[in-house]
Image (spheres, rainbow, N blue to C red):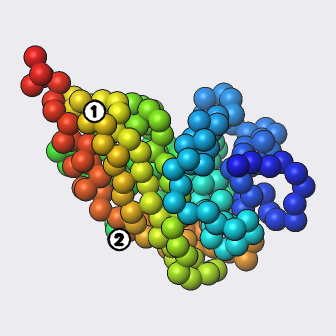
């Protein structure tokens, strides 16, 4: 699923592995390149959509995956090639707008998810939020683009996120259930196809509710 061969396409709309490979001077959060080899195998086996290379769908999917990787693993937004860092804004379901620096500081989970009985983004850090969801989905929480409804500059698309709840979520035991959520995003891009803003629409409570259906560990004693 990766290639580092020369191409006329800008780096940020090539596959994620190619973006990772071009890392001269990059400040990686964990001091090394992220390894998506396991995730890529899962995507090959479980994806429902096979977008033609060079199509608008493939380009948008590559761009969003590059952004997700950079937001998670690159600590300095000025080094994110997928966005216009000083102009970038992101919000979910009409909520507050966040900058690239906000995303780098607290993480996408803490900006996506609202405070509820199942999760409190006000008390979780970037690292703790990553740990919580990686523990719940040890085989990965995968993302793919389903359909593009409009092209640049306001790219509107539908996506799906899914994974197997095979690890503990806080004090809830895993159920082994495949948990899937879908949503819509409007990505405003510039003439170079770098992201200026992202506006997401999805049911955050549904996702958390499914994770909290596992039996609490204390109930098993």
Question: Which of the 4 image quarters holds residue 163?
Answer: top left
Residue placed at 15% from the left, 30% from the top?
Answer: 216
Q: CA distance from mark 1 to mark 2?
A: 32 Å
Q: Position of residue 7 (x, y in %)?
A: 87, 60
Give the side of residue 67 with respect to residue 99, left or right: right
Residue 190 can be seen, yes or no: yes
Residue in front for this viewpoint, 96 or 108: 108
Residue in front for this viewpoint, 62 or 26: 62
Residue in front for this viewpoint, 48 or 14: 48
| Label located before the other in sequence (1 or 2) | 2
| Residue furthest front as drawn | 45
According to the picture, the residue beneath numbered tag 2 turns out to be 94
Q: Work out which quarter of the rendered image holds the C terminus and state it.
A: top left
Residue placed at 55% from the left, 43% from the top?
Answer: 42
Residue in front for this viewpoint, 161 or 192: 161
According to the picture, the residue beneath numbered tag 1 turns out to be 174
């Amino acid at each position: 699923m990766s290639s580092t061969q020369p191409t006329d396409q800008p780096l940020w709309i090539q596959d994620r592995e190619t973006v990772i490979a071009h890392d001269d001077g990059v400040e990686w959060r964990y001091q090394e390149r992220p390894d998506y080899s396991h995730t890529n195998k899962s995507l090959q086996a479980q994806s429902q959509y096979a977008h033609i290379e060079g199509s608008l769908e493939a380009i948008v999917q590559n761009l969003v995956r590059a952004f997700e990787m950079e937001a998670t693993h690159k600590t300095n937004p000025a080094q994110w090639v997928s966005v216009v860092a000083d102009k970038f804004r992101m919000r979910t379901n009409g909520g507050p707008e966040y900058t690239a620096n906000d995303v780098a500081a607290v993480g996408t989970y803490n900006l996506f998810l609202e405070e509820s009985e199942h999760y409190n983004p006000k008390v979780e850090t970037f690292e703790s939020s990553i740990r919580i969801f990686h523990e719940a989905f040890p085989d990965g929480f995968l993302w793919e683009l389903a359909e593009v409804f409009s092209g640049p500059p306001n790219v509107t698309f539908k996506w799906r996120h899914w994974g197997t709840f095979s690890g503990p979520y806080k004090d809830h035991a895993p159920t082994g259930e495949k948990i899937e959520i879908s949503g819509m995003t409007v990505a405003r891009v510039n003439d170079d196809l770098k992201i200026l803003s992202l506006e997401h629409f999805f049911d955050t409570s549904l996702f958390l509710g499914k994770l909290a259906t596992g039996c609490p560990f204390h109930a098993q004693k």
